[in-house]
Image (spheres, rainbow, N blue to C red):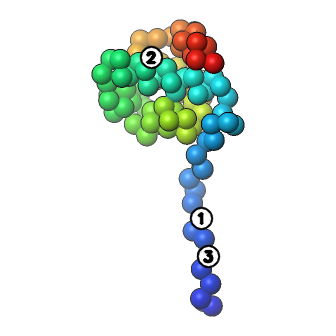
Amino acid sequence: MNGESHPRTSSKQPPLRQELAAPICIALGIVFRELRLKRRLSMYAVAKLAGVSREMVRRVECHLSKPSLDMAARIGSAFGLRMTQLLALAEQHC
């Protein structure tokens, strides 16, 4: 080696910038957080009910990941909501 330092590469994707995220994705994150806090659930509890990782719940709530329809439906099911109900709630935040 010649003493040059090389930047470490990471397989992690950079955080999703809010201005690039679809408004509906941001709104879903807001809705999920509001529902979770209103019901006094931890991210871990929601993740367990939804069958997803706690990290995915965190990433969606913090607008770091765009949830797929399947992911949104799974998280919504943890609150007993159908996709149409979730989208109606999310529309109020757009």
Residue 49 visible in image: no
In the rendered image, the quadrant that contains the N terminus is bottom right
The residue positioned 30% from the left and 22% from the top of the image is 40
Residue 67 visible in image: yes
Find disc 1 in the rendering and name its residue: 9
The amino acid beneath tag 3 is His
Name the mark on residue 6.
3
The crowd level at tag 2 (other Cα within 10 Å; few <14, some 14-19, many 20+) is some
Image marks 3 and 1: residues in contact by CB distance under 8 Å: no
Find disc 2 in the rendering and name its residue: 77
Q: Nearer the viewer, residue 58 or 34?
A: 34
Q: Nearer the viewer, residue 1 or 63?
A: 63
The residue positioned 57% from the left and 60% from the top of the image is 10
Classify 2 as above or below 51: below
The crowd level at tag 3 (other Cα within 10 Å; few <14, some 14-19, many 20+) is few
Classify 36 as above or below 86: below
Calculate the distance from the C-alpha at mark 2 to the C-alpha at mark 3.
45 Å
The amino acid beneath tag 1 is Thr
Q: Nearer the viewer, mark 2 or mark 3?
A: 3
Label 1 or label 2, whichever comes before in sequence order: 1
The residue positioned 55% from the left and 23% from the top of the image is 28
Helix or strand or loop: what does disc 1 sit on?
Answer: loop
Helix or strand or loop: what does disc 3 sit on?
Answer: loop
